[in-house]
Image (spheres, rainbow, N blue to C red):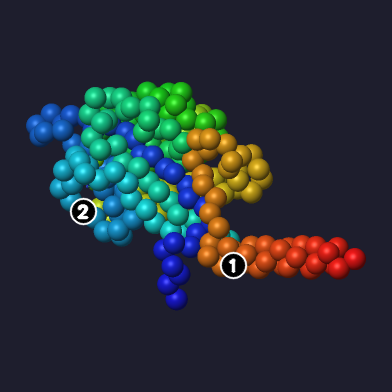
Amino acid sequence: MQASPYSYDYIFKYIIIGDMGKHPRMASIGTGKSCLLRRFTDRKFVDGLRNTVGVEFGTRIIRLEDRRIKLQIWDTAGQERFRSVTRSYYRGAAGAILVYDITRRSTFENIANWLMEVKNATAPHTVMFLIGNKSDLEGQREVTQQEAQKFAQLHGLLFAEASARTNTHVDECFLDTAARIYDLVESETIDTGALNSGIQRYASIWRCWKDIDILSAIILLWVNSSEGIAEQ
Ligand SMILES: Nc1nc2c(ncn2[C@@H]2O[C@H](COP(=O)(O)OP(=O)(O)O)[C@@H](O)[C@H]2O)c(=O)[nH]1
Ligand SMILES: [Mg+2]
């Protein structure tokens, strides 16, 4: 049964960042951020996305334990061409997905800069996931999995190689990030009430009804007791 798209317990905001970079022969080619996003939210590979213009974010509702969580994933809309992204883009991100292209070493080397930008602009508990995208292009690899793994460990990032094209490990990257954020929420490490936590708590319709039941019981009690006072 498909639940209502409006009933969920949390919204987690994610951002995706990484180079667009330059290819020696061709025009600029991105690391695949928009393709990863579309693969996760629309469950398809959309080739030839035009620099994200007009697409600001994608969403998908996932389930973790008995909670429904809406992942709201923001895409850079081409801002990364200038090697920096406005601060408002980072604001209130609970999860940051950093993407490099395993076939272009410069995109991996630049991750250190992206990481610095994210750390400077987000809350301390923002969960970060490093994706080495285009794992389908093994023959053109310029970055080994081991060195990326080592970098991720050093900086406390989750890590996986993935391919938006062949749909390899894409869901895992977004879902593992959500699971880590959820753990931080459950253990109260993240204060969901704090401004810019990147998390919004929502009452599902069912929960609302339960709250309304409790509220009407309180009103009824109050009316009864005040009637009792009036009769005395
Ligand atoms: N082979 C391969 N190509 C990919 C993959 N993901 C994206 N691409 C290609 O890389 C280019 C840039 O992708 P895009 O998502 O627009 O990059 P962005 O600028 O980082 O958003 C496009 O030509 C995509 O078709 C992948 O997993 N494998
Ligand atoms: Mg893009």
Q: Which residue is mark 1?
A: 209
Q: Which residue is mark 2?
A: 46
Question: 45 left or right of 169?
Answer: left
Report crowding for label 1: few under 14, some 14 to 19, many 20 or more residues within 10 A (C-alpha): few
Q: Name the residue located 44 percent from the left edge and 67 percent from the top edge.
A: 4
Query: Which amino acid does the dot numbered 1 rest on?
Result: Trp
The residue most toward the right is 232
Question: 103 left or right of 150?
Answer: left
The residue most toward the front is 231
- First in sequence: mark 2 vs mark 1: 2
Q: Secondary structure at mark 2?
A: loop
Report crowding for label 2: few under 14, some 14 to 19, many 20 or more residues within 10 A (C-alpha): some
Residue 232 screen position, x and y as percent: 90, 66
Residue 115 screen position, x and y as percent: 42, 28
Query: Which amino acid does the dot numbered 2 rest on?
Result: Val
Front-most of residues 220 and 153: 220
Residue 114 shows in this picture: no
Q: Give me the C-alpha separation between circle 2 and circle 1.
A: 40 Å
Quadrant into which the N terminus falls: bottom left
The answer to whether the residue labelled 2 contacts the one labelled 1, judged by CB atoms less than 8 Å apart, is: no
Q: Name the residue located 86 percent from the left edge and 63 percent from the top edge.
A: 229
Residue 191 shows in this picture: yes
Q: CB at mark 1 closer than 8 A to ligand 2?
A: no
The residue most toward the bottom is 1
Front-most of residues 168 and 184: 184
Residue 65 screen position, x and y as percent: 58, 61
Q: Name the residue located 53 percent from the left edge and 65 percent from the top edge.
A: 205
Question: 11 left or right of 213?
Answer: left
Front-most of residues 32 and 189: 189
Question: 188 left or right of 116?
Answer: right
Q: Name the residue located 73 percent from the left edge and 63 percent from the top edge.
A: 218
In the depicted structure, whether residue 58 falls above or below residue 4: above
